Image: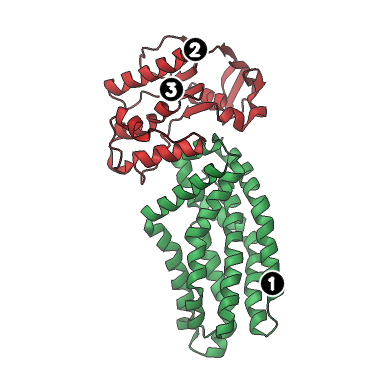
């Protein structure tokens, strides 16, 4: 479903990786590994179309993502370094607006937040870093319809139960025929291929 | 598409409600600048009436610029902007919704208090409507054009100064035509021509500015 054809990445005049190719079928996971600064985040940003590769192209179901535009955006969930939650809004409000941006029907917001154990009606700025991260990850519960998940450091700042919960969601998504690409330093119990970027 | 733009509009208004001080800053700035002039210039009614359109318009323009740098910067910092770039609606629609929210929060209050300021300058009652109408047509143009500048300077250090330098030349026609409409009305010539021109500017800005800022956002977000 997702295919990267010999992509190069150059940031600030420095070449991060060259001629990177892989292809993922439905139900497959890819873990991006490597030391800090090796281009994991850049690779994920290239995969979701936020960043243009210096060379090569990304194809989704056979079409180049540049030609698909919003059609491609609707198929993917991107969880970036920044949690994309507003400090002044509550977890429920944040999740509701995130669904609205993604064009998803807003259902079961409360139960999604409950699963992650975040107070639903407290402004995010009064929560801890880990709880903020949990509130951001609650999006995954509602995103099962989007086939492609791109997760940048999903386990950072999470305690063990929350990390297990994310692993469970990812495994469930893979079992349902989804595709997941994630970058992490932590050991995760998710079967799948590993791609190593060198610094 | 409508759902997405309504969602963004509602979110930005809700955020403005939670952070009332930001909203108050733009309005207070406008009130303070417009109120200081009569104190500094002196209470000569003819003089005040003559400078009123220009002073009120300049105050509105500066107050609108004051809040521009926040338009995308906050969303950029917490990662929400990336989600909007990857959203289900075209980015131009997102930008248009954000510019509308900016105007509702920073522009509309100025329009509503303008009759009060007009009293301070002893403008005759017939001109209050023209002043409010010129601001109602002109301030949305400031928000829309300002969005282009805010998108271009996103993530730059010292972006605030650059933003002012970028958008000021584009603001000048709005200022001249807006203040001109009130002056023409004061001279007994109606000022309708200038108001129509402002309306035309608004139509052009509403169509083109969102796409221009969308293109700029894509570059800045890389």
Spot the red chain and give its letter. Answer: A
What is the crowding at mark 3: few (fewer than 14 residues within 10 Å), some, or many (at least 20)?
Answer: few
Seen from the viewer's position, the closer of residues B72 and A108 is A108
| Res. B54 visible in picture | no
Q: Quadrant of the N terminus of chain B?
A: top right
Please, what secondary structure does the residue beneath circle 1 have?
A: helix
The image position of residue A165, as x and y in percent, is 33, 21
Q: Quadrant of the C terminus of chain B?
A: top right
The image position of residue B203, as x and y in percent, is 67, 58
Whether residue B198 sits left or right of residue A197 in the image: it is: right
| Residue at x 68%, y 51% (from the top left corner) | B208
| Residue at x 68%, y 61% (from the top left corner) | B201
Discs 2 and 1 lie in a common subunit = no
| Residue at x 43%, y 30% (from the top left corner) | A81
| Res. A27 visible in picture | yes
Spot the green chain and give its letter. Answer: B
Discs 2 and 3 lie in a common subunit = yes
- Name the residue beneath numbered marker 3: A36
Whether residue A146 sits left or right of residue B200 in the image: it is: left
- Name the residue beneath numbered marker 1: B194
Mark toward the viewer: 2 or 3: 2
Please, what secondary structure does the residue beneath circle 2 have?
A: loop
Please, what secondary structure does the residue beneath circle 3 have?
A: loop
């Amino acid at each position: 479903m997702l295919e990267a054809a010999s992509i190069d990445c150059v940031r600030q005049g420095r070449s991060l990786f060259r001629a990177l190719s892989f292809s993922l079928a439905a139900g497959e996971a890819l873990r991006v590994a490597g030391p800090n600064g090796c281009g994991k985040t850049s690779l994920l940003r290239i995969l979701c179309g936020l960043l243009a590769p210096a060379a090569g192209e990304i194809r989704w179901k056979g079409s180049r993502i540049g030609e698909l535009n919003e059609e491609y955006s609707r198929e993917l969930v991107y969880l970036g370094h920044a949690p994309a939650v507003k400090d002044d809004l509550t977890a429920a409000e944040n999740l509701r607006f995130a669904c609205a941006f993604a064009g998803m029907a807003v259902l079961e917001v409360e139960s999604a937040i409950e699963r992650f154990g975040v107070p639903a009606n407290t402004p995010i700025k009064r929560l801890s870093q880990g709880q903020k991260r949990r509130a951001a990850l609650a999006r995954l519960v509602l995103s099962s319809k989007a086939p492609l998940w791109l997760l940048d450091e999903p386990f950072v700042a999470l305690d063990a139960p929350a990390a297990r919960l994310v692993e469970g969601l990812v495994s469930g998504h893979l079992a349902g025929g989804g595709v997941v690409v994630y970058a992490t330093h932590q050991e995760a119990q998710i079967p799948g291929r590993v791609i190593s970027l060198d610094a | 598409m409508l759902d997405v733009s309504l969602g963004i509009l509602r979110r930005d208004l809700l955020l403005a409600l939670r952070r009332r001080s930001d909203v108050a800053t733009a309005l207070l700035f406008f009130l303070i600048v417009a109120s200081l002039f009569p104190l500094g210039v002196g209470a000569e009614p003819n003089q005040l009436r003559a400078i009123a359109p220009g002073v009120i318009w300049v105050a509105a323009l500066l107050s609108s610029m004051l809040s521009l740098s926040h338009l995308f910067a906050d969303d950029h910092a917490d990662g929400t902007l990336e989600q909007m770039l990857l959203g289900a609606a075209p980015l131009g629609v997102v930008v248009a919704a954000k510019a509308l929210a900016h105007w509702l929060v920073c522009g509309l209050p100025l329009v509503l208090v303008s009759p009060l300021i007009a009293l301070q300058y002893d403008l005759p009652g017939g001109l209050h409507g023209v002043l409010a109408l010129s601001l109602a047509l002109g301030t949305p143009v400031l928000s829309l054009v300002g969005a282009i500048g805010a998108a271009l300077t996103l993530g730059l250090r010292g972006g605030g100064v650059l933003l002012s330098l970028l958008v000021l030349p584009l603001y000048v026609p709005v200022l001249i035509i807006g203040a001109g409409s009130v002056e023409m009305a004061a001279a007994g010539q109606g000022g309708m021509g200038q108001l129509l021109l402002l309306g035309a500017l608004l139509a052009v800005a509403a169509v083109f500015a969102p796409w221009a800022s969308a293109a700029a956002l894509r570059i800045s977000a890389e």
